[in-house]
Image (spheres, grey):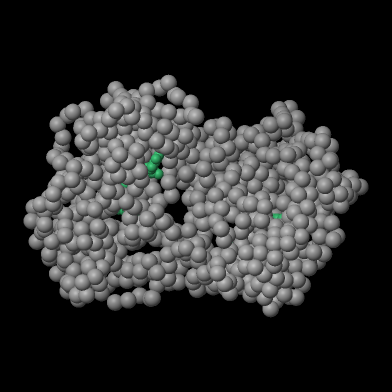
């Protein structure tokens, strides 16, 4: 078969652009689609990006990522960038349904690379919906905009390397940071030091941030986490406690802080709606949710569909870049633009780096693995699904009725049927049902097709008669 | 190998769509039988994909899902023979189907009450009527012809003039010339109906093996003795095949015979949630439209033989959208929230396959409900229960038995020939 049509790439983040560049280097054209108005993905989201320091990235990588735009420009002849373009799902076999402004059309592909990134995991607790409670990404966005501070007095709670980073960023922006609460135990970090040293520079930068926090008298509390927040209308107080090994708050260890904003980050979920709509095979991943099955070349269960970056498991920028490049190499090889020797010798370096990144990440993943105690932070009347106003006790009821899979739970409670498509509540529903059934595989809330609403007028020939 | 569960059941129901669930509910009402229901939701399972119309007359005279089905068949016919398109004539099903559909329809008000009162589940039964909206004189001829065919049901139909229609349904295209309404055709929320049957059955003691697939069927001689599942072996005296579009695979394993049941794909469009814009359900010759209990407007549906494919395709979606916008112009300014495709369990004569099969013991069919399984689930559950218990049946099910496919064809009416040509 002769391939003349461009490779189609969904996502102009680190993974997508890296794939396009690698393809270009092999002389292969690509079309890169992104709903955002700029390239760069999650790291560069929001205005004034260039000025942002990303202190937990090593300087080499920082350069590589900020190089993304430059790399794109260097290979522009081969890359057709279509921004403000949302992929809504598959249309029949080997086509995408795509929306640009008011226009909905089909785009056919021979090979597809899905590089759609991730979003933050929302963990509900008593009071989580109160204005002033924010996810880390939202906090970062406001900081990056440089216009408004998310709050005057803040704390950061959750797990993972982003916590100290955001705390440093907040402090630099002039926010009074009252404390950082990391659910993982200090001893766990010590135990994982070996894994973390797979990326020594990253580890050192992490240490650097910790000493920065110390120097500025920002306490870092290990093995502690959120219990609830309170206030009238707006956030006034946040209540923390020591966590058991299973992350249940230990009674009598509670502390409360008066603050006006709380940054919460309990990890990320892969954006896998597209891979689900394509009915690719998936594994259940306790860290990033549903994970499309891929081979070592990032190839999915479908011959001509590849997946790279956060959408196939959260590894950070370096991992995303390498995965994008590996997928591209594999396509170049199938298209006989590079020999298998060439591909293999190039890919060897990528595989080695990817392995190190994975070992590094696995350390954090072991520490930050969500535990069942988080499920105890809801009161019976705590809202789980805010689109459809489903409370914890609604969920209790259907579990009592013997619901065995997430779809039935959704059909009976309407949790996840609202406009956000379960982005917010799915994590809790999934974890809760899995916990009750002692089986993490409870199925998944299937994404809607199309991924966003589209106007009838985009498909109609106008009103007739 | 799998572990043998030491439980033995009187009945195992394979398939937990609306048909399997209805059987489970009716069979468990007396709470005297040990029943297990085994279901794995396969992509495209019909009950969750359905529109939820209880269009007993509408579907029996070829409106609703039917209208598109017969439109397409007529076109294919004309294509194949090179003839001009014949004027559209309604496709009216035989009396025994009317009886089946109407009897089932009549059960819903009481069933709704019963499931709410006794089991605390609500499948959102709504009295809506079904209006066939007419745009021109051909549509009117079509409607006249329908009425001619159903003299016995005259008290269930009413004609609406253009003005009456405009008053009743102000959002329907003002250029429509009127409507023919079927007063007894209503709607439910289909997935809630499915879940309601299941939950009520569970409360009555039925054991639900959800997310569980029937992998093979064990027999001793010509008798079914159990099913192998991914949750282990489940022994039983009787197996009910309610596997929807997958029924042929199951019957093959149980009886050696592949039932003539195959998937017929239907695509559906759902709008964003809207304030009440439709009082009743609507069918035109392009599509049907129903506003569901939560305000979303549902538009269906295509009729496609594409195997087990469940993708949505732009040309077909556009057809539906154009049909809907023509009928309710304001939709053009609103949003589509979701599209999907489901697989109707079709049969060559479009009637279900119910009851035992000669030469096999401990096996009952409850499948092939094509485009009316939501509507006819109630009567199906009741008939299967009565059949199992040897009670007198509410109606003769001979026309729905598998053996009808074995008999030499006597029925040579034009319609059935047309179906054969189109489907075989
Ligand atoms: C909130 C947040 C903050 C982060 N902060 C940092 C940080 O400070 N430092 C760090 O190193 N890493 C950070 N990360 C992780 C880092 O972004 C990733 O590991 C890496 O950059 C991911 O690259 P990617 O290409 O896989 O995804 P992304 O860079 O996220 O790119 C995915 C792109 O796909 C597009 N897309 C998705 N779906 C569609 C669709 N249907 N149609 C069209 N376009 C679509 C998105 O718009 C996006 O641009 C953060 C991640 C998140 C979510
Ligand atoms: C688009 C569309 C619109 C429709 N609109 C209407 C309408 O308005 N009114 C109406 O009355 N009808 C309508 N129908 C038809 C109706 O939905 C079907 O007739 C009905 O749902 C059939 O129910 P079922 O239980 O036989 O099949 P299904 O709902 O498909 O259930 C069969 C179940 O068995 C499972 N299964 C199969 N094999 C196995 C196995 N080996 N092990 C375990 N489980 C198995 C399947 O996965 C499935 O869950 C519509 C159908 C479609 C597709």
Q: Is residue A415 visible?
A: yes
Q: Position of residue A344 (x, y in %)?
A: 73, 59
Q: Quadrant of residue B358?
A: top left
Q: Is residue B102 left or right of residue A61?
A: left
For the point 13% across and 49% down, which residue is it? Answer: B408
> Which residue lies most toward the top here?
B6
Q: Position of residue A303 (x, y in %)?
A: 56, 58
For the point 51% across and 56% down, which residue is it? Answer: A277
Q: Is residue B197 visible?
A: no
For the point 78% across and 54% down, which residue is it? Answer: A353
Q: Is residue B410 left or right of residue B28?
A: left
Residue situated in front as seen by the camera: B311 or B188: B311
Residue situated in front as seen by the camera: A11 or A382: A11
Count of labels shown? 0
Q: Position of residue A27 (x, y in %)?
A: 68, 73
Residue A146, compared with residue B111, is above or below; it is below
Q: Is residue A252 left or right of residue B267?
A: right
> Which residue lies most toward the bottom here?
A77
| Quadrant of the frame with the C terminus of chain B | bottom left
């Amino acid at each position: 078969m002769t391939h003349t049509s461009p490779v189609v790439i969904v996502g102009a983040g680190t993974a997508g652009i890296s794939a396009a560049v690698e393809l270009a280097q092999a002389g292969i054209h690509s079309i890169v689609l992104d709903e955002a108005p700029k390239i760069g993905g999650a790291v560069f989201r929001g205005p004034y990006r260039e000025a942002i320091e990303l202190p937990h990235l090593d300087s080499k990588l920082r350069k590589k990522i900020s190089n993304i735009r430059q790399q794109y420009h260097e290979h522009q002849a081969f890359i057709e960038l279509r921004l403000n373009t949302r992929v809504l799902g598959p249309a029949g076999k080997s086509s995408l349904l795509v929306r640009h402004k008011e226009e909905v059309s089909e785009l056919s592909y021979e090979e597809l690379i899905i590089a759609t990134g991730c979003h933050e995991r929302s963990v509900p607790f008593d009071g989580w919906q109160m204005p002033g409670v924010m996810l880390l990404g939202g906090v970062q966005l406001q900081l990056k905009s440089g216009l408004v501070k998310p709050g005057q007095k803040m704390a950061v709670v959750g797990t993972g390397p982003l916590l100290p980073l955001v705390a440093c960023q907040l402090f630099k922006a002039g926010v009074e940071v009252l404390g950082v609460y990391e659910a993982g135990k200090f001893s766990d970090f010590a135990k994982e030091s070996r894994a973390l040293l797979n990326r020594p520079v990253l580890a050192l930068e992490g240490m650097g941030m910790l000493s920065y926090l110390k120097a500025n008298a920002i306490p870092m509390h290990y093995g502690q986490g959120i219990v609830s927040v309170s206030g009238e209308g707006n956030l006034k107080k946040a209540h923390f406690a020591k966590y058991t090994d299973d992350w249940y708050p230990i009674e009598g260890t509670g502390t409360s802080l008066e603050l006006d904003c709380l940054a919460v980050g309990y990890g990320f979920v892969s954006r896998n709606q597209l891979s689900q709509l394509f009915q690719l095979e998936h594994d259940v991943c306790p860290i990033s949710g549903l994970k499309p099955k891929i081979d070592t070349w990032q190839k999915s269960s479908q011959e001509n569909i590849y997946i790279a970056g956060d959408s196939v498991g959260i590894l950070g920028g370096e991992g995303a870049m390498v995965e994008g490049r590996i997928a591209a190499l594999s396509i170049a090889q199938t298209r006989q633009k590079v020999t298998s020797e060439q591909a293999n010798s190039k890919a060897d370096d990528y595989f080695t780096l990817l392995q190190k990144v994975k070992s590094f990440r696995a350390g954090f993943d072991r520490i930050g693995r969500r535990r069942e105690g988080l499920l105890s932070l809801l009161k019976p009347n705590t809202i789980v699904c805010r689109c459809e106003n489903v409370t914890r006790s609604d969920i209790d009821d259907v579990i009592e009725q013997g619901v065995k899979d997430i779809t039935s739970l959704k059909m009976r409670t309407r949790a996840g049927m609202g406009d956000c498509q379960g982005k917010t509540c799915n994590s809790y529903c999934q974890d809760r049902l899995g916990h009750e059934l002692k089986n993490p595989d409870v199925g998944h809330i299937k994404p809607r097709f199309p991924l966003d609403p589209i106007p009838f007028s985009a498909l109609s020939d106008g009103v007739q008669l | 190998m799998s572990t043998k569960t030491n439980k033995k059941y009187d009945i195992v129901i394979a398939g937990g769509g609306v048909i399997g669930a209805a059987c489970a509910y009716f069979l468990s009402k007396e709470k005297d039988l040990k029943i297990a229901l085994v279901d794995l939701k396969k992509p495209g399972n019909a009950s969750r994909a359905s529109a939820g119309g209880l269009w007993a007359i509408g579907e029996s005279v070829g409106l609703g899902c039917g209208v598109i089905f017969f439109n397409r068949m007529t076109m294919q016919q004309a294509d194949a023979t090179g003839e001009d398109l014949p004027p559209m004539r309604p496709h009216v099903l035989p009396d025994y189907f009317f009886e089946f559909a109407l009897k089932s329809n009549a059960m819903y008000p009481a069933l709704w009450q019963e499931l709410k009162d006794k089991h605390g589940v609500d499948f959102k039964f709504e009295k809506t009527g079904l209006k066939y909206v007419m745009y021109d004189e051909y549509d009117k001829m079509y409607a006249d012809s329908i009425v001619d065919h159903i003299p016995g049901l005259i008290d269930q139909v009413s004609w609406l003039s253009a003005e009456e229609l405009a008053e009743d349904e102000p959002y329907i295209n003002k250029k429509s010339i009127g409507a023919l309404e079927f007063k007894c055709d209503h709607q439910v929320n289909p997935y809630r109906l499915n879940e309601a049957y299941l939950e009520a059955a569970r409360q009555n003691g039925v054991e639900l093996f959800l997310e569980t697939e029937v992998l093979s069927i064990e027999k001793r001689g010509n008798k079914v003795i159990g099913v192998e599942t991914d949750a282990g072996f489940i022994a039983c005296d009787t197996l009910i095949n309610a596997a929807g579009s997958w029924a042929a695979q199951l019957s093959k394993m149980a009886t050696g015979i592949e039932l003539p049941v195959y998937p017929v794909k239907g695509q559906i469009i759902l709008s964003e949630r809207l304030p009440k814009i439709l009082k009743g359900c609507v069918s035109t010759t392009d599509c049907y439209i129903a506003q569901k209990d939560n305000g979303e407007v549902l538009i269906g549906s295509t009729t496609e033989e594409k195997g087990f494919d469940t993708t949505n395709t732009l040309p077909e979606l556009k057809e539906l959208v154009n049909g809907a916008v023509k009928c309710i112009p304001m939709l053009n300014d609103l949003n589509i929230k979701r599209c999907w495709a489901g697989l109707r369990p079709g049969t060559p004569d479009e009637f279900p396959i119910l009851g035992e099969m000669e030469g096999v013991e401990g096996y009952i069919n409850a499948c092939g409900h094509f485009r009316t399984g939501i509507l006819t689930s109630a009567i199906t559950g009741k008939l299967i229960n009565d059949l199992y218990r040897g009670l007198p049946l509410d109606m003769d099910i001979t026309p729905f038995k598998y053996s009808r496919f074995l008999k030499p064809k006597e029925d040579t009416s034009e319609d059935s020939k047309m179906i054969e040509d189109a489907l075989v």
